[in-house]
Image (tube, coloured by chain):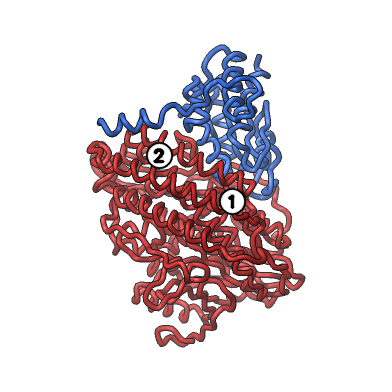
Chain colours: A blue, B red
C-alpha cells in the first residue's frame, strides 16, 4: 500500500491547472473548456458513446478524454453504459447497415431533450468509406445530429470543443 | 520448391518482404491434402479469402495462406463458374477450425462456398439479399432492400438451470460493436458464442478499381489501432507485386513507426486491465504514459496514431536528428515509469488474484486454432515474425536487430499481462537501436504499379500477424485487396478462454486479448 500511495503522490495532479492568461499551453485550453462546459450546462453531463461502424480510431481518442490530462469525468462529464441514462449520444461512424437498427434503438432509448454529436470524418459525412451496399454513410443519414466534429480521428481537444458546442446549442 | 513432398510446386515471392511462397492447387483434393500435411507439421492457417477473377481468366479463385516455420505459403485454387450455383471447394474447418468464419465471410462476399455443414451467413445480417454477392464483378449497384435484422442460429445449451445472456451489439463501454451470447449456469460460463460483422462497411469492395494512393489511405483505416501494421503490410504486398524496393532508411523508419504503434496499445491495455479488476490507479497511470507517447507522435509525425505515414515505396515522414533524440529520451522516461508500475501490479495481491488462472488457453489449443501474436506467445509458443527462429529469417530491418521474442507459458490473463510488459521493454530497446542506428538516405522511391501483378505482405503488428493480399488489374489499378487481421484466429480462442470462468471475469479476459472488430468485419 505504501509504495502505491508514494507513486500517487509522486505523480501529482496532472489535470491542467489554471494558468495565467496568454500562456500558450494546451493545458489552459483544456481548463477553459472544462469551465465553459460546466458554466453553460450548469450541471453534470452524461454521454453514451455509440460506435456505429468506425475503424476504432475515434474510440481511442474518446478513451483519451478520460486520461488525467483531459480528465473529463473529473469535471462531472461522465460516460454511461445505457442510453437511458444519457443526455448525449456521441456517435462514431460510418453507420454500417448492420448497425443501423441498433443505432436507431439507442437513439429512441435516449430520453428527450437529447443531443447527438457525430464524431470523425466518417461520422460527419461518411469519410473514406462513404455510402455503399454495407454503409449508410454519415450519422445524419440515420438519426438527427446536432453537432459534427470532423477529424480522422478528431483530437481529444477537438472532441471537447465539439461537446461544448453541442451543449451551447441546447441552451 | 516443394513442401512436405506434396505435389505442389511453390515459387518464392521476390522482394524484401517476409518469406512468401506461391503455389497453385490442381483441384480441391490437392488443397485438402496439402492442408492436412500442414496441420500434421503444426503449421497454421494464416488467411483465407476469395476472388472473382472471371474477367481476367474465367475463374473464381480461393486463396489460402498457410504458415510454416519457414514462412508463408500462398496457395490458390481455381474454381469454375457454376452459373447460378455457388462454386464449391472442400471445407477446411475440420482441419483448421479458424477457417469456419473466413469461409462463411467469403461466401457472403464472393459467392463461393465450402462444402461444410455450417451454412450460416457471417457478414450478411439482412442488409442485402442472400443471392447478391458484392465482390462479384457483375454485382452491379446494391439492390434496394429493407434492412430487417435476421435471426441467427446460436448453438443452444440445455440442462437444468442453463440460461442465456445476450450482450451487444452495443456494449456497455467505449468499444466497438459485436454480439456475445453467453450460456451460463449461475455465474459459470458454459459457452460463449460470438456473432460479429456489425462493423462490416464494405471495405474490400472500396478497394476494387481504386488507385494505389486511395488503397493506402483505406488500408490505414481497416483497424485504427493498427494503422502502421496495415499500411506496411499493404505497401510490402504492392512492392512485391511491382518489383519496387523501398530504400533502407524507409525500412528503418517503418520499423520505428511499427514499434511506436505497439507500445501505446500495450500501455492502454495494461491500464484498462487494471481498471477491469477495479484498480483505477492503473488506468490513470498508464493512460497518462500513453498520452505522453501520442503527443510526441503528433509532434514528430503530424498524427497521434501515425496514420498515412507508411506509403507504398517508402515512408512519408523524415524525422531529423533532434526528433530521433527525442524518441530515445522518451524511451528512457517511459521505461522507468513502466518498471515502477510493473512492480506495483506484481505486488498487488488483489490484482494478481484476478489475473492468475483466469481465461486460460494452452499451447495445444492455440496451435489448433492457428492463434498468432501476443496471445499465442502468452501460451508459450515462440512465434514472432520479427524474430529469428529455426529456418526463418525475418525481413529487414528486423533481421539485423536481433529481436528477442517474449513468451510466457501460463496462457492466462496474467501471462498476457506479463507478455505485454515484456514486449514494451523489448520495443523500447528496439526503438533505441533504430533511432541511434538510423541510416541516412532517401525515405521513398517512386511507386509505379505493375499491370496484373500480385503480392502478399505480412507484418507482425501489436496483436499479431497482419496479412494483406494485393492484386493489380491490367490498368495498374487495384483489382482486389484482402486485409487479414490476427483477430480472425483469436476470437475463437477467446470463446475457449472464458469457458468455466465466471461472467464477471469476461471483461477482464476480453481486454487481455483486446481483439479488433473492424479488422475482421471489414
Q: Secondary structure at mark 2?
A: helix
Q: Please name whichever residue, B270 or A92, is drawn nearer the observer in this view of the structure.
A: B270
The quarter of the displayed image where residue B386 is located: bottom left
Q: Which residue is mark 1?
A: B323
**Residue closer to the observer: B170 or B220:** B220
Q: Which residue is mark 2?
A: B272
Give the image location of residue B236, x and y in percent: 59, 67
Residue A93, percent from left and from top? 62, 40
* Marked residue nearer the N-terminal end (1 or 2): 2
In this view, the residue in front, B321 or B68, is B321
- Which tag is nearer the camera, tag 1 or tag 2? 1
Seen as rendered, the residue at the extreme top is A42
Measuring 41% from the left and 59% from the top, which residue is drawn there?
B373
The chain that hosts pointer 1 is: B
Q: Which mark is residue B353?
A: none
- Gap in angstroms between the C-alphas marked 1 and 2: 30 Å
Q: Are marks 1 and 2 in contact (CB under 8 Å)?
A: no
Left or right relative to B272: residue B359: left
Q: Nearer the viewer, residue B18 or B8?
A: B18
Name above or below for residue A152 compared with residue B477: above
| Residue neighbourhood size for the residue with mark 2, other residues' Cα within 10 Å, grouped as few (<14), some (14–19), many (≥20) | many
**B306 shown above or below B403:** above
Residue B51: in sight, yes or no? no
Amino acid at each position: 500500500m505504501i509504495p502505491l500511495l508514494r507513486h500517487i503522490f509522486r505523480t501529482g495532479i496532472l489535470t491542467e491547472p489554471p494558468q495565467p492568461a496568454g500562456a500558450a499551453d494546451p493545458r489552459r485550453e483544456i481548463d477553459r473548456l472544462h469551465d465553459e462546459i460546466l458554466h453553460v450546462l450548469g450541471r453534470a453531463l452524461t454521454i453514451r458513446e455509440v460506435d456505429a461502424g468506425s475503424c476504432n480510431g475515434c474510440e481511442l481518442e474518446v478513451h483519451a478524454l478520460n486520461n488525467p490530462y483531459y480528465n473529463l469525468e473529473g469535471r462531472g462529464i461522465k460516460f454511461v453504459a445505457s442510453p437511458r441514462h444519457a443526455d448525449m449520444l456521441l456517435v462514431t461512424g460510418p453507420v454500417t447497415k448492420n448497425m443501423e437498427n441498433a443505432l436507431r434503438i439507442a437513439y429512441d432509448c435516449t430520453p428527450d431533450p437529447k443531443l447527438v454529436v457525430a464524431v470523425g470524418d466518417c461520422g460527419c459525412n461518411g469519410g473514406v468509406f462513404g455510402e455503399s451496399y454495407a454503409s449508410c454513410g454519415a450519422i445524419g443519414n440515420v438519426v438527427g445530429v446536432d453537432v459534427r466534429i470532423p477529424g480522422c480521428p478528431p483530437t481529444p481537444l477537438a472532441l471537447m470543443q465539439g461537446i461544448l458546442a453541442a451543449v451551447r446549442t441546447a441552451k | 520448391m516443394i513442401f512436405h513432398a506434396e505435389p505442389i510446386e511453390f515459387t518464392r515471392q521476390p522482394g524484401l518482404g517476409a518469406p512468401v511462397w506461391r503455389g497453385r492447387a490442381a483441384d480441391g483434393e490437392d488443397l485438402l491434402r496439402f492442408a492436412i500435411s500442414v496441420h500434421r507439421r503444426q503449421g497454421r492457417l494464416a488467411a483465407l479469402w476469395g476472388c472473382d477473377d472471371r474477367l481476367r481468366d474465367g475463374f473464381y479463385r480461393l486463396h489460402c495462406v498457410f504458415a510454416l516455420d519457414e514462412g508463408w505459403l500462398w496457395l490458390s485454387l481455381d474454381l469454375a463458374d457454376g452459373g447460378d450455383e455457388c462454386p464449391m471447394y472442400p471445407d477446411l474447418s475440420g482441419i483448421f477450425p479458424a477457417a469456419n468464419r473466413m469461409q462463411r465471410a467469403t461466401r457472403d462476399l464472393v459467392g463461393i462456398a465450402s462444402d461444410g455443414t455450417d451454412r450460416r451467413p457471417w457478414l450478411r445480417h439482412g442488409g442485402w439479399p442472400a443471392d447478391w454477392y458484392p465482390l462479384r464483378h457483375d454485382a452491379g449497384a446494391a439492390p434496394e432492400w429493407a434492412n430487417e435484422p435476421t435471426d441467427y442460429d446460436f448453438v443452444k445449451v440445455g440442462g437444468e438451470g442453463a440460461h442465456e445472456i445476450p450482450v451487444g451489439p452495443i456494449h456497455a463501454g467505449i468499444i466497438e460493436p459485436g454480439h456475445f451470447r453467453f450460456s451460463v449456469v449461475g455465474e459459470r460460463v458454459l459457452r460463449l458464442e460470438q456473432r460479429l460483422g456489425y462493423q462490416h462497411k464494405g471495405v474490400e469492395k472500396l478497394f476494387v478499381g481504386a488507385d494505389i494512393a486511395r488503397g493506402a489511405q483505406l488500408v490505414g483505416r481497416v483497424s485504427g489501432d493498427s494503422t502502421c501494421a496495415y499500411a506496411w503490410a499493404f505497401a510490402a504486398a504492392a512492392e512485391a507485386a511491382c518489383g519496387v524496393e523501398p530504400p533502407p532508411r524507409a525500412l528503418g523508419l517503418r520499423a520505428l513507426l511499427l514499434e511506436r504503434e505497439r507500445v501505446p496499445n500495450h500501455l492502454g491495455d495494461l491500464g484498462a486491465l487494471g481498471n477491469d479488476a477495479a484498480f483505477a490507479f492503473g488506468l490513470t497511470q498508464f493512460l497518462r504514459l500513453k498520452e505522453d507517447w501520442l503527443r510526441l507522435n503528433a509532434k514528430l509525425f503530424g498524427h497521434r496514431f501515425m496514420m498515412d505515414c507508411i506509403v507504398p515505396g517508402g515512408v512519408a515522414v523524415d524525422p531529423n536528428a533532434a526528433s530521433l533524440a527525442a524518441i530515445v529520451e522518451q524511451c528512457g522516461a517511459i521505461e522507468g515509469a513502466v518498471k515502477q508500475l510493473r512492480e506495483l501490479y506484481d505486488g498487488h495481491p488483489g490484482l494478481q488474484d484476478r489475473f492468475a488462472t483466469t481465461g486460460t488457453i494452452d499451447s495445444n489449443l492455440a496451435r489448433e486454432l492457428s492463434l498468432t501474436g501476443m496471445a499465442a506467445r502468452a501460451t508459450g509458443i515462440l512465434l514472432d515474425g520479427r524474430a529469428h527462429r529455426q529456418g526463418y529469417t525475418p525481413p529487414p530491418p528486423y533481421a539485423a536487430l536481433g529481436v528477442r521474442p517474449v513468451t510466457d507459458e501460463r496462457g492466462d490473463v496474467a501471462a498476457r499481462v506479463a507478455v505485454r510488459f515484456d514486449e514494451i521493454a523489448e520495443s523500447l530497446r528496439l526503438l533505441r537501436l533504430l533511432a541511434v542506428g538510423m541510416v541516412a538516405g532517401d525515405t521513398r522511391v517512386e511507386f509505379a504499379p505493375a499491370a496484373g501483378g500480385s503480392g502478399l505482405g505480412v507484418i507482425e503488428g501489436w496483436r499479431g500477424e497482419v496479412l494483406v493480399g494485393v492484386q493489380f488489374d491490367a490498368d495498374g489499378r487495384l483489382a482486389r485487396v484482402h486485409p487479414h487481421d490476427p483477430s480472425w484466429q483469436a476470437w475463437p480462442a477467446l470463446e475457449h478462454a472464458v469457458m468455466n470462468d465466471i461472467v464477471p471475469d469476461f471483461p477482464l479476459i476480453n481486454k487481455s486479448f483486446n481483439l479488433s472488430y473492424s479488422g475482421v468485419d471489414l
